[in-house]
Amino acid sequence: MKKLRSCALAAALLMLTGCGKIDSSSEKSTENTSAASSAAETTEATESASSAADEATPALDGYDLLWSDEFNGSSLDDSIWDYDPHEPGWTNNELQEYTTSEDNVFLRDGSLVLKAIKSEKNGRDYYTSGKIKTQNKKDFTYGKIVARAKVPEGQGLWPAIWMMPTDESYYGQWPKCGEIDIMEVLGSSTDTAYGTIHYGEPHAEQQGTVVLDSGTFASDFHDYSVEWEPGEIRWYIDDELYLTVNDWFTAVSGEDEKPYPAPFDQSFFVQLNLAVGGTWPGNPDDTTDFDNAEFLIDYVRVYQKPEYDTNVKKPEKQFREPTEDGNYIFNGDFSEQEDLTDDENWKFLLFEGGEGNAEIKDGMIVITTENEGTVDYSVQLVQPDLPMIKGKKYRVTFDAWADEERDIITCVSAPNAGWIRYLQDTTLTLTSDKQTFTYDFEMTEKDDNNGRLEFNMGNKGSSATVYITNVRVEEIE
């Protein structure tokens, strides 16, 4: 899901760029102005953080507590947090004004509350909400960040726990500066949570998704955590690992890439916010209940290992080999049963109100739709891990039909490269007769080992059952 954020300039800091080990027992800079010092909190600082966090903050094996906020007081702790006010439209076409008002940011019953409020201004709907950050107060390099939170439900609400670099200009403006999204949930689909990393240039991202089998992230508190280390970042929900990333990059357009693991080798800070509207979630509507538009955070805890080995190398990309007949699609004839919920070969996905089912039978896949949802990818069949090599030409072919005439969209997308399209979104009309569809394209972007063939069946004015078989992606001269 492509999301754009602006990166405001911050005061320049000295950044750690060398190799070796970060030792968290070394002396801490009093101004916290280098990545080495932010990663090297002294024993005194650790003890102070532990004391401030009270006995409610548990120890974690293999880690020291760097800082935490259990939100047990009566007001926001300004030794940790700053308000981050912004006018509407600051980023992502969001509607809210982020304020310093205690109506939008306050503590209640041991939790931080970020509340979105709908009012009227100049005869139009007006929204305020809360955003806070630890920039220049609790910056650090590498660690385990754990936040326990309960999200609000409602169209257009967009809670997030995320991290940005202290000096956002060090490697260049977003996305070159890097961004770590610990958790995002759309209020219109609260059974699904996302963890994402942004980097580049060009803009690239990698994203993991957790969909609950029962309940929602709005019905209870959940733990969201990230383990950030040199050369690897891991995402967890309720201690279950769901995303591991180790192959990022950053560069200025036309120049060589910066030494790995840039940009994630510098000091970052934590921020919490509840957005209203924007390019990803869409705007609120009459169903959005602003009386209950509250993002609740029970605690934020940051731990750090005593030392980190920073002498890491970027792993080489592994590219899938085609089948014997040159097909990069595995199980393209649907001759084998497979788990359509895992990350191998075919995967069936539902988003944004989409309801349906996919079944492999009789040498084809059958996609039934109960609710077409609100976006084209609400009902979606994909196969990832397609090798896309710059300068090569590819052909996509498949047979498809439907119970009655209806449209679907196909494309080859780039989940790790800002969701650009190698084969552009192409709408095709299915009939009750089997048809063969063929599309050729040339790969003009940098090599990518994770191209993704998509069939999107949502939000097309039809829930007619779709049948697909004989799917191929192959190189052509």
Image (tube, rainbow, N blue to C red):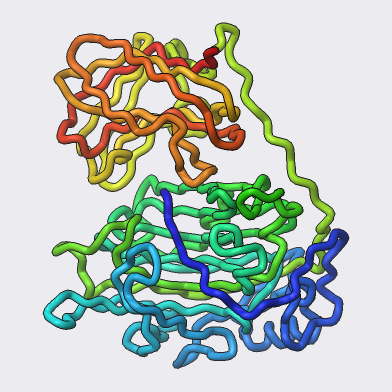
Q: Residue at (60%, 58%) from the top-left corner?
A: 176
Q: Does 45 sit left or right of 57 as displayed?
A: right
Position of residue 227 relative to residue 65, above or below, is above
Residue 356 picture location, percent across and down: 27, 33
Residue at the spot 49% in from the left edge and 25% down from the top edge: 442
Quadrant of the rendering where the C terminus is positioned: top right
In the rendered image, the residue lying farthest to the front is 254
On the picture, is 116 further left or further right than 166? left
| Front one among 397 and 336 | 397
Q: Residue at x 51, y 54 (%)?
A: 195
Instruction: Give the residue furthest to the bottom.
Output: 74
The image shows residue 60, relative to residue 193, as above or below, that is below
In percent of width and height, residue 439 lies at 39, 19
Q: State which quadrant residue 273 falls in.
A: bottom left
Q: Is residue 67 above or below residue 102?
A: above
Query: Splitting the image into 4 quarters, where does residue 374 fall?
Result: top left
Q: Nearer the viewer, residue 197 or 47?
A: 197
Residue 459 is situated, as x and y percent measured from the top left of the image, at 22, 39
Q: In the image, 125: left or right of 171?
A: left
**Outermost top residue:** 325
Residue in front for this viewpoint, 401 or 357: 401
Please tell me which residue lies in front, 381 or 174: 174
Asked whether, in this view, residue 451 is left or right of residue 259, the answer is left
Coordinates of residue 436 in the picture (x, y in percent): 32, 11
